[in-house]
Amino acid sequence: MKFRPTNNRPDTAAFTMVEIAICLAIIGFALVAIIGVLPLGMNTQRDNREETIINQDATVLLEAVRNGTHGANDLTNYVYAITNHWASYNVNGTPTLGKNGYTYTAASLNGIPNAYYSLTNGAHIVGLLSTPEFTDLNGMPISSLFNTAGYSNHVVAYVRSLSGLAAEKPPQDNQIMKEDTFSYRILCVNAPVPFDTNSAFAGFSKQLSANLHELRMTFLWPQLPNGKLGNGRQTFRATIAGQIARTNDLYFYQSQSFTNAP
């Protein structure tokens, strides 16, 4: 028995051009929404990462300063510059402005080179970050410049992240990698505790002010290649009991120890 071909064709299921166009339109709207949210998510992730790094680095630097650390030489790999914008005041309040600059290879005191203060060891870094907010003309810490001649100090450190990516850590010598490392600035203030000079306990208050300081570190990030700063800002505070000792124009909080008295 032979089958004869016929001209009757079965119905074929398919999408029309209109249906395909509608599907593409729906997919296009979804992609636009996803692409619009993606940068926001990436920015949030970046901000969270940077805040985490700042919190971890702040703990290390605060403890180094408050303990008067001398041996933290690893800081030389991360703190690449420190500046002190100072102002000298006479008893009439007339200021004279100056600037000290410190890097790993050089240092200058108001334009006069002095290689001794280069950031070649951790003690120099901690000693500069511990510079009191107010000092007298001999460089000794004082509580204020009210009716007194002396200096006010504005210390800023430029730092590469201590707790960033492992690929950014020393002995990394790739200049491009170094420039891309997350960096920030620190405004470091070692302020004496204020006291009332007119109080009946002015003598006690003055003594308290000389032995109690508020350490404030304000982190500003990120440090951009053009020298400007991003929008990140966070301040960490710590109250430190103890005097600030001066050694070769470097300052250190006296280490605190406790003994069990009988």
Image (cartoon, helix red, strand yellow):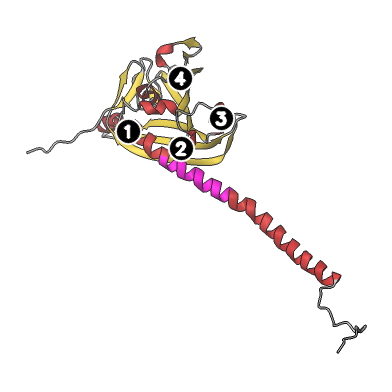
In the rendered image, which residue does mark 4 sit on? 104
Q: Main structural element of the magenta stretch: helix, strand or loop?
A: helix
- Residue under label 2: 166
Say few, some or many: other residues with alpha carbon within 10 Å of mark 2 (under 14 / 14 to 19 / 20 or more). Answer: few
Could you give the CA–CA distance between mark 4 and mark 2, rounded to whole angstroms?
Answer: 22 Å
Q: Which of 204 and 34 is in front in this view?
A: 34
Q: What element carries label 4?
A: loop
Residue that extends furthest to the bottom in the rendered view of this protein: 1
Q: Which of marks 4 and 3 is in front?
A: 3
> Can the viewer see residue 8?
yes
Q: Does the magenta stretch include residue 51?
A: yes
Q: Where is residue 143 in the image (x, y as percent from the top left)?
A: 35, 27
Quote the CA–CA distance across marks 4 and 3: 16 Å
Question: Where the N terminus falls, by quadrant?
Answer: bottom right
Query: Residue at position x 41%, y 41% from top?
Result: 56
The residue that mark 3 highlights is: 179
Q: Residue at x 46, y 19 (%)?
A: 102
Q: Are marks 2 and 3 in contact (CB under 8 Å)?
A: no
Residue 96 position, x and y percent, is 50, 16
Mark 1 and mark 2 lie on one chain; the one further toward the N terminus is 1
Q: Which residue is drawn at 55% across and 26% down?
A: 175
Residues tagged 4 and 2 counted as in contact (Cβ below 8 A): no
Location of residue 37 in the rendering, given as x and y in whole percent from the top left corner: 64, 56
Dot 1 and dot 4 residues touching (CB under 8 Å):
no
The amino acid beneath tag 3 is Glu
Closer to the chain start, of discs 1 and 4, is 1
Question: In the picture provided, is 241 more to the left or to the right than 225?
Answer: left
Q: Earlier in the sequence, mark 3 or mark 1?
A: 1
